Image (tube, rainbow, N blue to C red):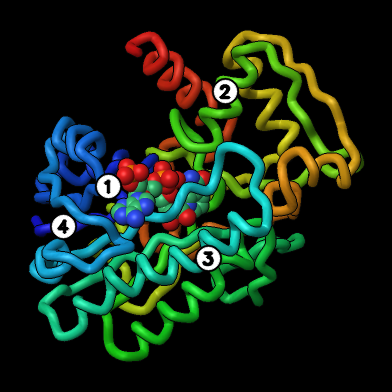
Amino acid sequence: MARLFLAGGSGFIGSAFTRQALAVGHSVQALCRTERSAAAVRALGAQPIMGDLLEPGAWQSQAAQAEIVLHFAQPQTFGGRIGRARALRYQADRQIMDRNLLSPLQGSAVQRIIYVSGTSYYGQQDLPPKDESAKPNPRGWGPYIVKALQQLEAFRAAGLPIITVFPASVYGAGSWYADILASLKAGKTQLTLAHRDPTLATVHVEDCARAILHLLTCAPIGERYIICDDRPPKYSEILAQSAQALNVPLRTRAVPLWLGRIIAGPVITDAYDAHLSNARLRSTGFRFQFPTIEQGIPDAVRTWLAAQNHR
Ligand SMILES: NC(=O)c1ccc[n+]([C@@H]2O[C@H](COP(=O)([O-])OP(=O)(O)OC[C@H]3O[C@@H](n4cnc5c(N)ncnc54)[C@H](OP(=O)(O)O)[C@@H]3O)[C@@H](O)[C@H]2O)c1
């Protein structure tokens, strides 16, 4: 069992990972920038280390003493309108955060670094499903993570033992999907784009965390893994399955792209089809608990409802 240092351990995927990593006996230190996040990771059983990725600090030497470092942290990507200015701030901050975490690991005894990126980097991919060797066609948030990935490549070329994972759209009781569930439950009309029903690659948050835990020990250094389930659904299917699991009616209103861009912003409305393959992940022996949204959404909705009842 290994000593893990996590950035973003209080987040949606990071907290699911923390719970699973502790359950199999790893020790977890999690970087926290607020007392609220520290209390959350402490409640999971991890040790909070105070610090902000945007600022160098004593936390960097703690990271350098770990055996494995996992980087789940990012500036927030959901909630409210996402305009170009917000996306450019994300792009700049993400590079600073990565540099502050990765630079002190050079020359350290850290054996593995798991860097969590996203499939928006691969962006629009048509059928047949594409794997990690596909030519990237960044869309949505994708164009704003390219610079961070180029910087990451320089760290990798300089000898850092990096494995990069690209989760698809991660659904569960948090992040963007919790916003959709809250909106459905409140009876709100769901906005969709007229003449556009994108195919989203998806993965249940517990499977995403399990896949990363699985790759922790078996992935070769330098490798990339797309983390998506077996069948990418249409966005309309996600809405319909979610409404059904919540037992609420689904009301949608299709708006033209220009109006969608005004309401939600150009990043969210840059809809694309993500036909991606999990063949490389599956070739490592990984098995999904929720291979498609048909199995996963009822579980995610149950977990979200239980969390609402405890608030
Ligand atoms: N969610 C998805 O659908 C999805 C899909 C594909 C890829 N991903 C990728 O997966 C990773 C994790 O995503 P997520 O959805 O779990 O993110 P999240 O819920 O937004 O969590 C982000 C985490 O980063 C931390 N953080 C943000 N700024 C920080 C800073 N300056 N210093 C220290 N910590 C900071 C947050 O801490 P606080 O608790 O203090 O806020 C939080 O723990 C990201 O790289 C994301 O791009 C996510």
Q: Where is residue 245 in the image (x, y as percent from the top left)?
A: 58, 16
Which residue bears the numbered disc 3? 91
203 lies left or right of 82: left
CA–CA distance in space, label 3 to label 4: 26 Å
In primary-sequence order, the first of circles 3 and 2 is 3
Q: Give the position of the N terminus as an image quadrant.
A: bottom left
Residue 29, x across and y down, in percent:
14, 51
User: CA gap, disc 4 to disc 2?
Assistant: 32 Å
Label 4 belongs to which residue?
4
| Chain-order first, disc 3 or disc 4 | 4
Q: Between marks 3 and 2, how big is the CA–CA gap?
A: 28 Å
Query: Mark 3 near mark 2, Cβ–Cβ under 8 Å?
Result: no
| 2 over 15 or under it: above or below | below
Question: Image quadrant of residue 145?
Answer: bottom right
Q: Mark 1 points at which residue?
A: 9
Kind of residue indicated by mark 1? Gly
3 vs 4, front mark: 3
Q: Which residue is drawn at 66% across and 47% down?
A: 200
Sooner in the amino-acid sequence: mark 4 or mark 2: 4
Element type at mark 2 = helix
Picture quadrant of residue 104: bottom left
Q: Identify which amino acid the numbered label 2 is placed on.
A: Leu
Q: How crowded is mark 4: few (under 14 residues within 10 Å), some or many (20 or more)?
A: many
Q: In this view, does 291 lie to the left or right of 284?
A: right
Task: Mark 4 or mark 1: name the one nearer the start of the chain.
Answer: 4
Q: Nearer the viewer, mark 4 or mark 1?
A: 1
Check if mark 2's residue and mark 1's residue have beta carbons within 8 Å. no
Residue under pointer 2 = 181
The residue at label 1 has a CB less than 8 Å from ligand 1: yes
